[in-house]
């Protein structure tokens, strides 16, 4: 492989054929080889299971530098957005590419607010579900059903339809999420309140009872707002790639978001914060922590402490730094009402931040460690954790979908494969088979 300026020349040593592969560079990060001509020139594909070294698209939305611990939404550092912005403003930024003026933000907020209610026919869907099913099953069914209730905005070639669908999905996801919880608990559904902001409204729909007055705890609302902002988008992860792949066929946005929900449901993706709580429950008491830490350090023991380290962030997860403060503020607010599990979490955090084994391997508490603790402290049951994640990530999925619809290079997704099955075989009649 010889390199020229802005190209790499690949030689097939079998035939002597050569092809110049262009090198493309983005605003930040590594360059990429544009290998689209390899098959036509050499008759060869690249082989990259899991797409770990393959860029499947170009994007203006999110940038991650895992080595330096950098996360940017449309060029804005996540630290600034988490400190100064609201979730609705971040939604506007991801969808439109720039921060809104005061008038633009108010118009956008009103557009989202006017779509928060769901069709009453959708709420009757829940009676067909088992009450003890996982809430993500409810979300898959209901979001998929939105394409039948809101079929007036499913023409993906129409920019106005795309905008309305985006607003509907962002607005209705908290209502559907809260309804999933209420149904599983046998509680009446709450209607959204337009005077409340996004986070407060979700907490109200989750926990308000018709028998009592309900006021949203501002510490809880602030912590949830932080979670939503930090999870709004995260580049080409499994669920976002699923949305893009589904939508590349021209599927409507509700169906495409269902693909993201299904992918997020997996324990290796959206279920990571659930796994953190299960780890803390397995430890049981703070005095047991050394035993489990020793197991995690033992290279011959497959045991893993969930919530430490990150596949992408090799130094530190910038989201974890931000959410840690929200977590500690929330636990302080609980005071003596703290769950005994939080004592385990705080001691485990202390060990991870001080122990040389964890520090040398950059195994710091990640965003899932803190978000799981926060959600539990707010009284959100463990099976709702991934639902909250889906609620936060919906805007990222939609922003990526809208970007893809406007991409002149868009083509239907069709990954190639390396076939390793049997060679050509002749059919043998059943009575002649051994």
Image (cartoon, grey):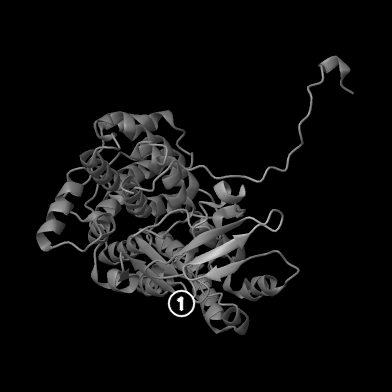
Q: How many marks?
A: 1
- Residue at the image point whose x is 35% and y is 38% from the top: 254
Helix, strand, or loop for circle 1?
loop
Instruction: Say left or right for 131 vs 16.
Output: left
Q: Give the percent coordinates (x, y) of residue 215.
A: 22, 57
Query: Badge 1, how many Cα within 10 Å: few under 14, some, many 20+?
Result: few
Residue at x 22%, y 45% (from the top left corner): 192
Does the image show residue 257? yes
On the rendered structure, is 364 left or right of 162? Answer: right
Residue most extreme to the front: 16
Q: Which quarter of the picture shows residue 11?
A: bottom right
Image-quadrant location for residue 115: top left
Residue 259 position (above or below residue 332): above
Q: Quadrant of the N terminus?
A: bottom right
Q: Position of residue 359 (x, y in %)?
A: 57, 81
Vertical comparison of 290 with 56: above or below: below
Q: Nearer the viewer, residue 94 or 42?
A: 42
Determine the image quadrant of residue 200: bottom left
The residue that disc 1 covers is: 68
- Compared to residue 246, the image places residue 377 above or below, namely below
Residue 185 appearing in the image: no
- Please state if 428 lies on the left or on the right of 335 as rendered: right
- Viewer-proximal residue, 426 or 343? 426
Q: Residue at x 66, y 46 (%)?
A: 418
The residue lying furthest to the right in this view is 434
Q: Position of residue 379 (x, y in %)?
A: 39, 57
The residue lying furthest to the top in this view is 431
Tell me the quarter of the image containing the C terminus.
Answer: top right
For image coordinates 34% across by 47% down, the residue present is 408
Residue 96 drawn at (x, y percent): 24, 56
Camera-side residue of 54 and 434: 54
């Amino acid at each position: 492989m010889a390199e020229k300026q802005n190209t790499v020349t690949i030689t097939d040593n079998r035939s002597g054929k050569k092809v110049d592969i262009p090198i493309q560079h983005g605003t930040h990060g590594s360059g990429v080889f544009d290998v689209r001509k390899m098959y036509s020139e050499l008759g060869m594909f690249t082989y990259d299971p899991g797409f770990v070294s393959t860029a499947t698209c170009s994007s203006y939305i999110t940038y991650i530098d895992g080595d330096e611990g950098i996360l940017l939404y449309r060029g804005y550092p996540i630290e600034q957005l988490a400190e100064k912005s609201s979730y609705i403003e971040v939604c506007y930024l991801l969808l439109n590419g720039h921060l809104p003026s005061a008038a633009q933000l108010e118009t956008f907020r009103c557009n989202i607010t006017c779509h928060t209610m769901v069709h009453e026919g959708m709420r009757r869907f829940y009676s067909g579900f088992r009450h003890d099913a996982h809430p993500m099953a409810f979300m898959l069914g209901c979001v998929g059903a939105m394409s039948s209730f809101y079929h007036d905005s499913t023409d993906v070639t129409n920019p106005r339809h795309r905008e309305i669908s985006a607003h509907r999905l962002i607005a209705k996801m908290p209502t559907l999420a809260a309804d999933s919880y209420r149904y599983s608990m046998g509680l009446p559904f709450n209607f959204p309140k337009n005077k409340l902001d996004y986070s407060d409204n979700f907490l109200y729909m989750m926990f308000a009872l018709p028998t009592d007055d309900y006021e949203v705890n501002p510490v809880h609302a602030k912590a949830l707002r932080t979670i939503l902002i930090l999870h709004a988008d995260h580049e080409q992860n499994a669920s976002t790639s699923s949305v893009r792949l589904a939508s590349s066929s021209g599927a409507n946005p509700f169906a495409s978001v269902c693909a993201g929900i299904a992918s997020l449901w997996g324990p290796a993706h959206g279920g990571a914060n659930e796994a953190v709580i299960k780890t803390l429950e397995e430890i049981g008491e703070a005095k047991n922590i050394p035993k489990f830490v020793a197991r995690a350090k033992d290279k011959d023991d497959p045991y893993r402490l969930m919530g430490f380290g990150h596949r992408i962030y090799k130094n530190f997860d910038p989201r974890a730094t931000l959410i840690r403060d929200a977590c500690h503020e929330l636990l302080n607010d609980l005071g003596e009402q703290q769950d005994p599990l939080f004592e385990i979490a705080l001691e485990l955090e202390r060990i991870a931040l001080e122990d040389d084994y964890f520090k040398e391997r950059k195994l710091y508490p990640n965003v899932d460690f803190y978000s799981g603790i926060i959600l539990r402290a707010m009284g959100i049951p463990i099976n709702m954790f991934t639902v909250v994640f889906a609620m936060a990530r919906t805007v990222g999925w939609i922003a990526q979908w809208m970007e893809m619809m406007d991409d002149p290079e868009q083509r239907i997704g069709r990954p190639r494969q390396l076939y390793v099955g049997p060679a050509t075989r002749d059919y043998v009649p059943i009575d002649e088979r051994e």
